[in-house]
Image: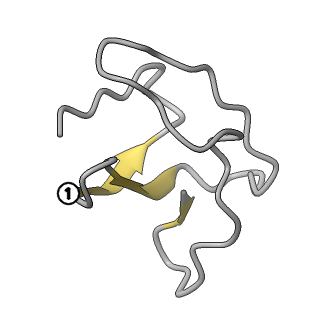
Amino acid sequence: MAPSDSDDWGDDILGRDVLNPGESVFIRFLRYEPGQCLYDISVVGKDGAEGTLTRVNLCATETVTFSL
C-alpha cells in the first residue's frame, strides 16, 4: 500500500506470509500522510496471482476486498 502519487510500495504490511481464502485481516499502516486520501493497494496471492487497486480513497473507504 502506498500513496497514489508515490513510486515506492514500501515494506510488506500484511504482517504474515499468507492470508488463506476466506480469511481477513485488519491492517493499520504507518505511511499515512495527513490530507492524503488516495492510495494504491497491491496484493500477491499464494499462487503468484496479483491484483492492484489504484486511487482508492481511504478517507471514504473502510473495507477493501480482493478475490484472487
- 25 on left or right of 40: right
Disc 1 residue crowd, few under 14, some 14–19, many 20+, Cα 10 Å: few
- Quadrant, the C terminus: top left
Between residue 43 and residue 28, name the one nearer to us. Answer: 43
Q: Is residue 53 above or below residue 63?
A: below
- 62 on left or right of 30: left
Residue 18 picture location, percent across and down: 50, 38
Residue furthest front in the image: 47
Between residue 40 and residue 37, name the one nearer to us. Answer: 40
Residue 35 picture location, percent across and down: 69, 52
Between residue 55 and residue 30, name the one nearer to us. Answer: 30
Total residue callouts:
1
- Quadrant housing residue 49: bottom left
Q: Is residue 68 above or below residue 21?
A: below
Q: Which residue is drawn at the image coordinates 46% and 69% (left, top)?
A: 4
* Colour logic: secondary structure
Residue type, label 1: Ala
- Quadrant, the N terminus: bottom right
- Quadrant housing residue 12: bottom right
Find disc 1 in the rendering and name its residue: 49
Residue furthest bottom in the image: 7
Residue 48 picture location, percent across and down: 26, 61
Residue 32 picture location, percent across and down: 74, 51
Q: Which residue is drawn at the image coordinates 76% and 57% (left, top)?
A: 31
Between residue 26 and residue 33, name the one nearer to us. Answer: 26
Q: Is residue 25 above or below residue 1?
A: above
Secondary structure, mark 1, is: loop
- 23 on left or right of 37: left
